[in-house]
Image (cartoon, rainbow, N blue to C red):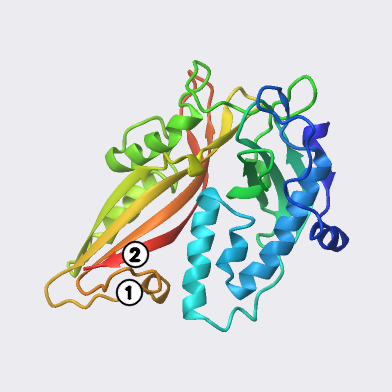
């Protein structure tokens, strides 16, 4: 089946990919026609070029180069991280080991209009037998494909996906409908509200009840107090992506913003992590506000079923300010 084709990102493919544009060619623009978001051959080239450019940008902490292959929450997290690490380690990362992908299948939906997306589900050289799910997106036909989300899941946590009559994966629209507990477009707002009030249709996990416990413990030290503020990622650059699962639910990739303000008690020293310090926009003497971007993947059940399951969450500091 086309949605389940498996390929390997070999070294030869990586060399070839450097000469091929991520944008590829399409004879149908896709503004109205329902067409595959990408061909399997082009998807393979996109992943190969992503791998090659990552292996050039990451050891050099090259933010500008990363901008050519990543966007959305993944780009925000990694570009801030590269900028921070490049400040702390201007010599680069001589210990960097190349990223490699094997045993890849592409989940390609048929879509009309823009943006379009597809998902690469691979084994990586980073996390043993865990699967990397990389979402690639673009907003118009003459734009390069860039990775917008990454989730890392054990193989047995990757759901079975439904397929249309042509064997393609099925995209789930952002808008609300009667078939799911929460629409993909509303999930960021629902999750950030849940972190504030502990309400909503979310199953217990380290990213829900575990997050409340972590925040409670952060304020057990009389030397400081930490305030948390969670905001939905409603900007178009952080648009969610969702695929229908075989059980009638959806696997949804979405982003969120998180602010942490730490205030030290009178006379207590404020210690700032060196990588956060590299992002500081103003001196931190008694208070430190760290803004983090997070990207999550959730299994949203069909309407009538209980418990949105947060399967993976990756976050990183994107800015900081002091006072």
Whole-percent x, y for residue 314 in the image: 50, 53
Residue 68 in the image: above or below residue 271: above
Furthest residue to the top?
178
Residue 281 in the image: above or below residue 29: below
Residue 88 located left or right of residue 285: right
- Label 2 sits on a secondary structure element that is strand
- Residue 207 seen by the camera: yes
The label shown at residue 272 is 1
Q: Quadrant of residue 198?
A: top left
- Residue 153 seen by the camera: no
Residue 23 in the image: above or below residue 83: above
> Which residue carries the number 2 mark?
320
The one nearer the camera, 67 or 198, is 67
Furthest residue to the right?
12
Residue located at (52% from left, 62% from top): 79
Residue 209 in the image: above or below residue 166: below
Question: Do labels 1 and 2 touch, CB within 8 Å?
Answer: yes
Residue 293 located left or right of residue 298: left
Crowdedness near tag 1: few (<14), some (14–19) or many (≥20) residues, C-alpha within 10 Å: some
Residue located at (69% from left, 32% from top): 160
Residue 221 located left or right of residue 1: left
Q: Quadrant of residue 51?
A: bottom right
Q: CA distance from mark 1 to mark 2?
A: 10 Å
């Amino acid at each position: 089946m086309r949605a389940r084709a498996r390929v390997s990102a070999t070294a030869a493919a990586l060399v070839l990919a450097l000469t091929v544009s991520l944008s590829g060619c399409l004879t149908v623009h896709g503004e109205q026609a329902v067409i595959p978001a990408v061909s399997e051959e082009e998807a393979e080239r996109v992943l190969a070029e992503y791998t090659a450019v990552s292996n050039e940008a990451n050891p050099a902490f090259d933010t500008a180069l990363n901008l050519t292959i990543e966007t959305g929450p993944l780009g925000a997290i990694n570009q801030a991280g590269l900028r921070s690490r490049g400040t702390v380690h201007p010599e680069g990362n001589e210990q960097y080991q190349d990223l490699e992908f094997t045993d890849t299948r592409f989940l390609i939906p048929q879509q009309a209009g823009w943006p379009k997306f597809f998902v690469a589900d691979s084994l990586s050289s980073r996390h043993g037998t865990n699967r990397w799910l990389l979402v690639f997106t673009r907003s118009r036909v003459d734009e390069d494909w860039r990775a917008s989300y990454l989730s890392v899941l054990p193989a047995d946590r990757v759901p079975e996906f439904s397929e249309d009559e042509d064997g393609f994966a099925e995209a789930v629209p952002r808008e609300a409908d009667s078939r799911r507990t929460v629409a993909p477009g509303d999930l960021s707002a629902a999750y950030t509200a849940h972190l504030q009030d502990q309400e909503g249709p979310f199953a217990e996990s380290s990213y829900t009840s575990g997050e409340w416990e972590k925040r409670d413990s952060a304020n057990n030290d009389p030397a400081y107090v930490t305030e948390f503020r969670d905001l939905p990622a409603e900007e178009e650059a952080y648009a969610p992506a969702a695929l229908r699962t075989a059980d009638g639910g959806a696997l949804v990739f979405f982003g969120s913003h998180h602010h942490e303000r730490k205030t030290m008690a009178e006379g207590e020293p404020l210690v700032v992590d060196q990588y956060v310090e590299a992002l500081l926009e103003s001196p931190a003497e008694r208070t430190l506000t760290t803004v983090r971007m997070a990207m999550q993947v959730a299994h949203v059940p069909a309407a009538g079923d209980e418990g949105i399951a947060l399967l993976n969450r990756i976050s990183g500091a994107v800015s900081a300010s002091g006072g």
